[in-house]
Structures are given as C-alpha cells and as structure tokens.
Image: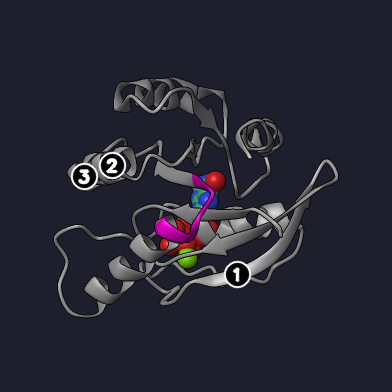
C-alpha cells in the first residue's frame, strides 16, 4: 500500500496550496478565510517516481472550540493515520503558541516530520525560515507553495523519510 503523508498546520499557512503544488493541479480548496478545508481529503500523489497518498487537513487549533475543534480532531486523526507528517508553518508569521503545541503533539506521535517553512516567496524571507530551527524538528525547508520556490527540495526531504 502507498505510504500516507498528512499535511497539517494552523489555518491559512498554505497547506492546501502546498497540496496543489505537489499534485501539480488545483484540486485542494484554497481560501483566504482560515479553516476552509473542513475535513481530511486524500489525493494520489507522486514525486520522483514514488507514489504516496497525500492528506490535506483543516487547521489544527489547539485551544479551539466549536467547528474548529472538529477541524483539530480531523488533523489529529490525520497524524495518527499518517506514516509521515508535513508540518507547515507560515515563516512570515513565525512559530506561534499553537505551533509550539503542535510540536509537542508531533513529538508524542513519534512520526517522522518534514518541517515546511511556507510563504518564503523571496530571499528576504529565508532568514525567517531559518529561525524555525528553534522548533527542534530539524531543518525547516523554505518553500513558497504559491510560486513553487523550494518545493522540490522539501519533497526530496520527504522521500528520505518516507
Ligand atoms: P490552508 O488554510 O493552510 O490550507 O491555507 P491555503 O492554502 O488555503 O492558503 C491560505 C492563503 O495563503 C491563500 O490566500 C494562499 O494564496 C496564501 N498562500 C499559500 N501559500 C503561500 C505562499 O507560499 N506565499 C504567499 N505569499 N501566500 C501563500
Ligand atoms: Mg486548506
């Protein structure tokens, strides 16, 4: 069976944009309004001849209530089902308390993690990405899911742990 890669992170960090970048087509719903991907959505994906199932999730809001709690549950389930997790952080915002809480949950899960520092659209933002080394999840891969910058390197890193 294909290994399962779950894409998780706070709302609006660019998870669905990254999923579309990896798929090479616009299938995941991208929205300016946070939390639009309500449920887990699985896609058949491929990189360098390796096939895997890519799971897009809604935002993981650690202290959230209502609909967001359901979204958080979906993400938590996605991690449980995943063989590898792509944890997406918005490099232009930096790590928030919610991101830190996710790091703890990821550590507890013991799953291999590829840390994606997204929205690195240009060289100026590279330094913001580098500060995410502080999360203790290894190398933050600077990516612009919107423009494609760095996504190949992040995917190569994914294959290393897949
Ligand atoms: P999700 O909620 O994590 O799935 O985030 P989305 O993929 O829906 O994206 C949220 C917003 O961030 C949209 O307006 C995207 O166009 C924007 N976005 C996503 N990736 C990037 C990126 O690499 N750079 C920039 N500048 N914006 C991005
Ligand atoms: Mg989404």
Give the side of residue 45 with respect to residue 42, left or right. Answer: right
| Residue, disc 1 | 42
Instruction: State the residue lying farthest toward the front.
Output: 1
**Where residue 101 is drawn, which disc sits there?**
3
| Secondary structure type for disc 3 | helix
| Residue 125, horizontal then vertical, whole percent | 47, 28
| Residue, disc 2 | 108
Indicate the quadrant where residue 91 lies.
top left
Few, some or many C-alpha atoms within 10 Å of disc 3 (few <14, some 14-19, many ≥20)?
some
Discs 1/2, front: 2
- Asked whether 107 falls inside the magenta stretch, the response is no
Q: Which residues are magenta?
A: 80-85
Measure the alpha-carbon separation of dots 1 and 2: 24 Å
Q: Is residue 133 above or below residue 97?
A: above
Q: Nearer the viewer, residue 61 or 93?
A: 61
Few, some or many C-alpha atoms within 10 Å of disc 1 (few <14, some 14-19, many ≥20)?
some
For image coordinates 49% across by 23% down, the residue present is 126
Instruction: State the residue lying farthest toward the right.
Output: 49
Few, some or many C-alpha atoms within 10 Å of disc 2 (few <14, some 14-19, many ≥20)?
few
Residue 14 visible (yes or no): no
Q: Is residue 45 above or below residue 85?
A: below
């Amino acid at each position: 069976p294909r290994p399962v890669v779950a894409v998780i992170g706070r709302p609006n960090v660019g998870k669905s944009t990254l999923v579309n970048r990896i798929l090479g087509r616009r299938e995941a719903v991208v929205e300016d309004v946070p939390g639009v991907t309500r449920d887990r959505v699985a896609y058949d994906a491929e990189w360098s001849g390796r096939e895997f199932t890519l799971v897009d999730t809604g935002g993981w809001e650690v202290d959230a209530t209502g609909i967001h709690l359901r979204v958080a549950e979906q993400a938590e389930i996605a991690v449980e089902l995943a063989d590898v997790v792509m944890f997406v952080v918005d490099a232009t915002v930096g790590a928030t308390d919610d991101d830190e809480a996710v790091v703890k949950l990821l550590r507890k899960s013991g799953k291999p993690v590829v840390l994606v520092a997204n929205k690195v659209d240009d060289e100026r933002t590279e330094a913001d990405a580098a500060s995410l080394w502080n999360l203790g999840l290894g190398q933050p891969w600077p990516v612009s899911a919107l423009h494609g910058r760095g996504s190949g390197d992040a995917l190569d890193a994914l294959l290393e742990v897949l």
